[in-house]
C-alpha cells in the first residue's frame, strides 16, 4: 500500500513557474514507476509525465515537452514536476500516481495508487 500526497499547486500568471511535489509513504518507493496526470473541468484525466523506477528515464506528453521536467528522489520518497512557461491551458487538477513494478506508462489504467490532487491555475 502506498499513500501519495501532492503539494505545490497554486495560482500563477502565464509564463510563470511552479514546482509540484508528491510525497509517498512506505519503504519500497523505488519499486514504483511514477506518473503525473491532470484533469481540467469537463475533460478526461490525461497523461503529463512519467519516470521509471531506478534509472529515472522520463517521458512527457507532447503538450508539455520542453516546458515540464519530472524527477525523483528515492531517498526522500518524493517525485517532482517542475513546470515552466506555464500557459492558461495547463490549468487543471494535477494528480500523482504510482505503478508498482512498472516501467513508466502513459496509460492511467496501469497505475495502482493515486493522490488526492493539487490545483494549478494559470491566469492569462
Image (cartoon, rainbow, N blue to C red):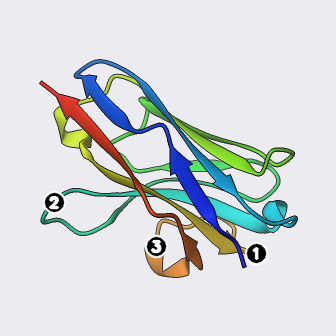
Q: In this view, does 105 lie to the left or right of 95?
A: right
The quadrant the N terminus occupies is bottom right
Q: In the structure shown, which secondary structural element does the residue marked by tag 2 occupy?
A: loop
The 10 Å Cα crowd at callout 2, few under 14, some 14 to 19, many 20 or more, is: few
- Disc nearer the start of the sequence (1/3): 1
| Residue sitting at x 55%, y 67% | 105
Residue 40 visible, this orientation? yes
Image height of 59 relative to 46, above or below: above
The residue carrying mark 1 is 101
Residue 41, numbered label: 2
Q: What is the C-alpha distance between the residues marked 1 and 3?
A: 15 Å
Frontmost residue, 58 versus 41: 41
| Quadrant of the image occupied by residue 41 | bottom left
The residue carrying mark 3 is 107
| Quadrant of the image occupied by residue 10 | top left
- Disc nearer the start of the sequence (3/2): 2
Image height of 109 relative to 102, above or below: below
The 10 Å Cα crowd at callout 3, few under 14, some 14 to 19, many 20 or more, is: few
Amino acid at each position: 500500500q502506498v499513500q501519495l500526497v501532492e503539494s505545490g499547486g497554486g495560482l500563477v500568471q502565464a509564463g510563470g513557474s511552479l514546482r509540484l511535489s508528491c510525497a509517498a509513504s512506505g519503504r519500497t518507493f523505488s519499486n514504483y514507476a511514477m506518473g503525473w496526470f491532470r484533469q481540467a473541468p469537463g475533460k478526461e484525466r490525461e497523461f503529463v509525465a512519467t519516470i521509471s523506477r531506478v534509472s529515472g528515464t522520463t517521458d512527457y506528453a507532447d503538450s508539455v515537452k520542453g516546458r515540464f521536467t519530472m524527477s525523483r528522489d528515492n531517498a526522500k520518497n518524493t517525485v517532482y514536476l517542475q513546470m515552466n512557461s506555464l500557459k492558461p491551458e495547463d490549468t487543471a487538477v494535477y494528480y500523482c500516481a504510482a505503478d508498482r513494478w512498472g516501467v513508466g506508462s502513459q496509460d492511467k489504467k496501469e497505475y495502482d495508487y493515486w493522490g488526492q490532487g493539487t490545483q494549478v491555475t494559470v491566469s492569462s
